[in-house]
Image (cartoon, rainbow, N blue to C red):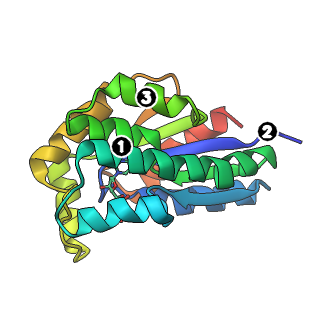
């Protein structure tokens, strides 16, 4: 059996992560791969706690966010990610621990310490795509979807998030310019995927 692969999509909201994940899933399934898609924070107890706080505009303290999100990720790794990889599936994730490096990092936590704590239990991705568009453009897209801004979506904060994404240099990290056509972005992603088939 071929080994499974862990593919992660990152970027601020409004960059088109879910569209690109859907298109990549179709592509991989045509190639005969088994694909599972998922996202973080999950809809489990710990993930919902963080989502509810952000939606109400009142964030938890950054330490509480880190602890809840680590618990959420630990469950996700044990229940979904590791079993999928063990069965030779491709797991496509909308956010994973680079989100914690960027978002909780932008709130003042030490980015390398966050990475270290995650890598104690979370397998590193085979590839992570950072869908990069200007923050102002991402905010326009989110607003035109009619979604309000939650506490994670203020412009200054997102600029800090984008700066941390921009400074990441893990061997599996790929910047994908994502302000063009959907299919152009997908072509850039497939080129990277083809190289790891
Ligand atoms: P998001 O992808 O916006 O979920 P949805 O669009 O389905 O509501 O995720 C919610 C927020 O969680 C997002 O703004 C980033 C934040 N987040 C963190 O701050 N740290 C993390 O480790 C993760 C996974 C997400």
Dot label at residue 115: 3
Local packing at callout 1 (Cα closer than 10 Å; few below 14, some 14-19, many 20+) is some
| Residue 93 percent across, percent down from the top left | 53, 52
Q: Which of these two is toward me, 126 or 179?
A: 126
Marks 2 and 1: which is nearer the front? 1
Q: Decide if residue 59 is on the left or right side of residue 16.
A: left
Dot label at residue 3: 2
Specify the quarter for ligand 1. bottom left
Q: Which residue is mark 1?
A: 66
Asked whether residue 18 is in view, the answer is no
Mark 2 touches mark 1? (CB < 8 Å): no
Question: In the picture shown, does residue 160 fall above or below 42?
Answer: above
| Residue 154 percent across, percent down from the top left | 13, 54
Task: Identify the residue at image location x=48%, y=57%.
Answer: 20
Asked whether residue 192 is in view, the answer is yes
Q: Decide if residue 187 is on the left or right side of residue 87.
A: left
Local packing at callout 2 (Cα closer than 10 Å; few below 14, some 14-19, many 20+) is few
Q: Which of these two is toward me, 87 or 112?
A: 112
- Mark 2 or mark 1, earlier in chain: 2
User: How far is disc 3 from disc 1 in space, using C-alphas?
Assistant: 11 Å
Q: Decide if residue 17 is on the left or right side of residue 85.
A: left
Q: Quadrant of residue 35?
A: bottom right
| Residue 22 percent across, percent down from the top left | 54, 63
Q: Quadrant where the C terminus lies? A: top right
Task: Identify the residue at image location x=20%, y=39%.
Answer: 107
Provide the secondary structure element on which disc 3 rests.
helix
Dot label at residue 196: none
């Amino acid at each position: 059996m071929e080994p499974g692969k862990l593919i992660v999509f990152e970027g601020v909201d409004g960059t088109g992560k879910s569209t690109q994940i859907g298109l990549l899933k179709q592509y991989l399934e045509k190639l005969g791969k088994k694909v599972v898609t998922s996202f973080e924070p999950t809809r489990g107890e710990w993930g919902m706690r963080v989502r509810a706080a952000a939606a109400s505009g009142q964030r938890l303290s950054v330490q509480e966010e880190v602890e809840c999100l680590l618990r959420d990720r630990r469950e996700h790794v044990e229940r979904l990610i590791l079993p999928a990889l063990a069965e030779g599936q491709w797991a496509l994730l909308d956010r994973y621990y680079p989100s914690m490096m960027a978002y909780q990092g932008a709130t003042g936590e030490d980015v390398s310490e966050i990475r270290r704590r995650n890598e104690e239990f979370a397998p590193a991705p085979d590839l992570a795509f950072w869908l990069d568009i200007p923050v102002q453009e991402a905010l326009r897209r989110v607003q035109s979807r009619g979604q309000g801004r939650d506490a994670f979506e203020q412009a200054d904060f997102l600029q800090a998030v984008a700066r941390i994404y921009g400074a990441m240099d893990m061997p599996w990290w790929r910047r994908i310019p994502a302000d063009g056509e959907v299919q152009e972005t997908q072509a850039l992603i497939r080129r990277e995927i083809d190289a790891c088939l």
